Amino acid sequence: MPETIVKLQDVAVFQNENLVLNNIDLEVKKGEFVYVIGKTGSGKSSFMKTLYADLPLKQGTGQVVDFDLKTLKEKDIPFLRRKLGIVFQDFKLLPDRNINNNLRFVLKATGWTDSTKMDEKIEEVLNKVGMKTKGFKFPHELSGGEQQRIAIARALLNDPELILADEPTGNLDPQTSVEVMKVLQDINQNGRTIIMATHDYALILKYPHKTLKCDGSKVFEVIQKAI
């Protein structure tokens, strides 16, 4: 049996005191690729933030990569996030340093100390996203699609058990979106579990996977119809 990476039971998601989503039951197994879709404001981002403990779990029970979201203490959140790779819509690269040093910064922040091992890891993740030759460039010298590939490489640095991608193609044109999706597909085919929030229906049809929809404060699975 594949191990369970995410398990939510009767979860409610709150933004401050406002109930955003209710009665969520979800199980995601190792190696799955799951889309989370829904209109702007339907709760996709709040759902993702709950998974990486940016929003506290106040109601229901939730496990993410063996961490209990209900009892998770503030000081343990960084340890949860080390097991996660998080990819945002707006890349969040540090503009004042080149790509290698962006990645090195993350490794140092998560406890790496051996310079040679850091260099090897940086080369490995850049290779995985097809950006091996770009490490000396600064973020502003790269296209949006290239920056998002770097953001995916950054998410892979600590060999995460789960990648959370929140609208990773939201700022990209359709062609570039497909290129970034291909990178995520490859990563998933190598055994990584991915949950991706998106409103890009063209991608969902091109790369069908299990799809959850946020609508009317509920989260439910929808079956994709092939075109």
Image (spheres, rainbow, N blue to C red):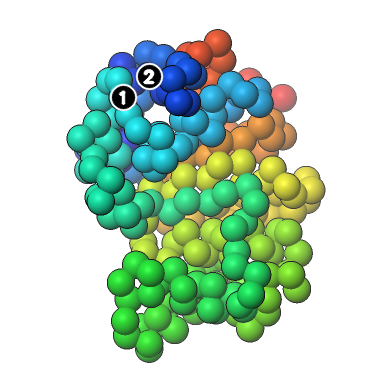
Residue 160 is at least partly visible in this image: yes
Q: Residue at x 45, y 37 (%)?
A: 49
Check disc 2: other Cα within 10 Å, few if <14, some if 14-19, many if 20+. many
Going 68% across and 55% down the picture, which residue do you hit? 179
Front residue of 191 and 41: 41
Q: Is there any visible trace of residue 3 in the rendered image?
A: no
The correct choice, above or below, for 67 with respect to 83 in the image is above
SS label for mark 1: loop
Q: Name which residue type carries label 1.
A: Lys
Amino acid under disc 2: Ala
Q: Which mark is residue 12?
A: 2
Rendered image: mark on residue 3: none
Do residues under tags 1 and 2 come within 8 Å of each other at their CB atoms? Answer: yes
> Looking at the rendering, in which quadrant would you find the C terminus?
top right
Q: Position of residue 97 (x, y in %)?
A: 61, 77
User: Which one is in front in this view, the residue at disc 1 or the one at disc 2?
Assistant: 1
Q: Residue 100, position in %: x, y? A: 55, 79
Mark 1 Cα within 10 Å, few/some/many (few <14, many 20+)?
some
Question: Residue under circle 1?
Answer: 58
124 or 2, which is in the foreground?
124
Q: Residue furthest bottom?
A: 116
Residue shown at 35% from the left, 52% from the top:
81
The residues bearing labels 1 and 2 have C-alpha atoms spaced at a distance of 7 Å
Percent across and percent down for residue 17 are: 43, 20
Residue 172 x, y percent position in the rendering: 74, 49
Label 2's element?
A: strand
In primary-sequence order, the first of circles 1 and 2 is 2
Residue projecting furthest to the top: 216
Residue 201 in the figure: left or right of residue 78 = right
Quarter of the picture holding the N terminus = top left
Q: How many marks?
A: 2
